[in-house]
């Protein structure tokens, strides 16, 4: 037997032993790595597309509002001024709360901004309270299409 034939015989024995182990442990000769990378890339692309879409939608709400100021006028009354800005002429509903020193809610008011009113406006609001309030909080404004306060 020549040296080359012995080396070929040893290599074929090693290959046969490797094939036996692959069959025993359920390994296939093909690598699944390209498939896994492809699936991961598709999932990442879908996730990135959703993230960009969600960021754009949430960055342009149909209505925004802010509390410009408040004044406690009596033990049973508080006045507030809010600014409401809508991206389109749609009805908005804004909720205000008066809170006492212990942070309990002592008064609440819902202000409706009609669809035919100016898109950006400043509104006064007077809240009737059960007892003395120390602050007024703007919870936010909603529209019929967007029930989350903005």
Image (cartoon, helix red, strand yellow):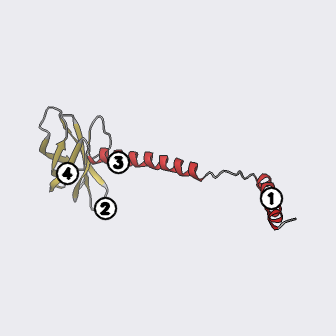
Camera-near label (2 vs 4) is 4
Instruction: Single out the mark in the foreground, 3 or 2.
Output: 3
Mark 3 vs mark 4: in front = 3
Q: Secondary structure at mark 1?
A: helix
Separation (CA) of disc 4 from disc 1: 79 Å
Q: Secondary structure at mark 4?
A: strand
Q: Label 2 vs label 4: CA separation?
A: 23 Å
Of marks 3 and 2, which one's residue comes earlier in the chain?
3
Kindly tell me whether residue 133 is visible in this rendering.
no
Q: In the picture, residue 132 is in which quadrant? A: bottom left
Residue at 14% x, 31% y: name it.
116
* Name of the residue lying farthest toward the right: 1
Query: Spatial distance from mark 3 to mark 4, Cα to Cα?
Result: 26 Å
- Reading the image, the residue beneath label 4 is 66
**Marked residue nearer the N-terminal end (1 or 3):** 1
In the image, is residue 79 above or below residue 1?
A: above
Q: Which residue is mark 1?
A: 12
Image spot of residue 85 (x, y percent): 17, 44
User: Residue drawn 11% across and 37% down?
Assistant: 118
Q: Nearer the viewer, mark 1 or mark 3?
A: 1
Question: What residue lies at 44% left-to-right and 45% top-to-bottom?
Answer: 46
Residue receiving disc 3: 52
Q: Give the class, few, some or many, for how many residues have Cα within 10 Å of label 4's Cα (few <14, many ≥20).
A: some
Mark-to-mark CA distance, 1 and 3: 55 Å
Provide residue 2's location: percent of width, then percent of height.
Answer: 84, 66
Q: Is residue 99 left or right of residue 84?
A: right
The percent coordinates of residue 126 (x first, y second) are 16, 47
Residue identifier under label 2: 102
Q: Are marks 1 and 3 in contact (CB under 8 Å)?
A: no
Q: Residue furthest front?
A: 2
| Disc 1 from disc 2: Cα separation | 84 Å
């Amino acid at each position: 037997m020549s040296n080359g034939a012995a080396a070929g015989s040893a290599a074929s024995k090693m290959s046969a032993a490797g094939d036996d182990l692959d069959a025993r442990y359920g390994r296939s000769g093909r690598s699944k790595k390209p498939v896994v990378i492809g699936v991961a890339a598709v999932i990442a692309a879908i996730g990135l597309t959703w993230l960009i879409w969600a960021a754009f939608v949430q960055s342009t709400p149909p209505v925004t509002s802010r509390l410009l100021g408040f004044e406690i006028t009596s033990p049973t009354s508080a006045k507030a001024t809010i600014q409401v800005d809508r991206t389109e002429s749609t009805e908005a509903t804004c909720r205000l709360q008066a809170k006492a020193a212990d942070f309990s809610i002592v008064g609440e008011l819902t202000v409706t901004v009609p669809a035919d009113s100016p898109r950006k406006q400043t509104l006064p609001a007077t809240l009737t309270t059960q007892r003395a309030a120390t602050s007024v909080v703007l919870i936010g404004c909603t529209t019929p299409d967007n029930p989350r306060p903005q």
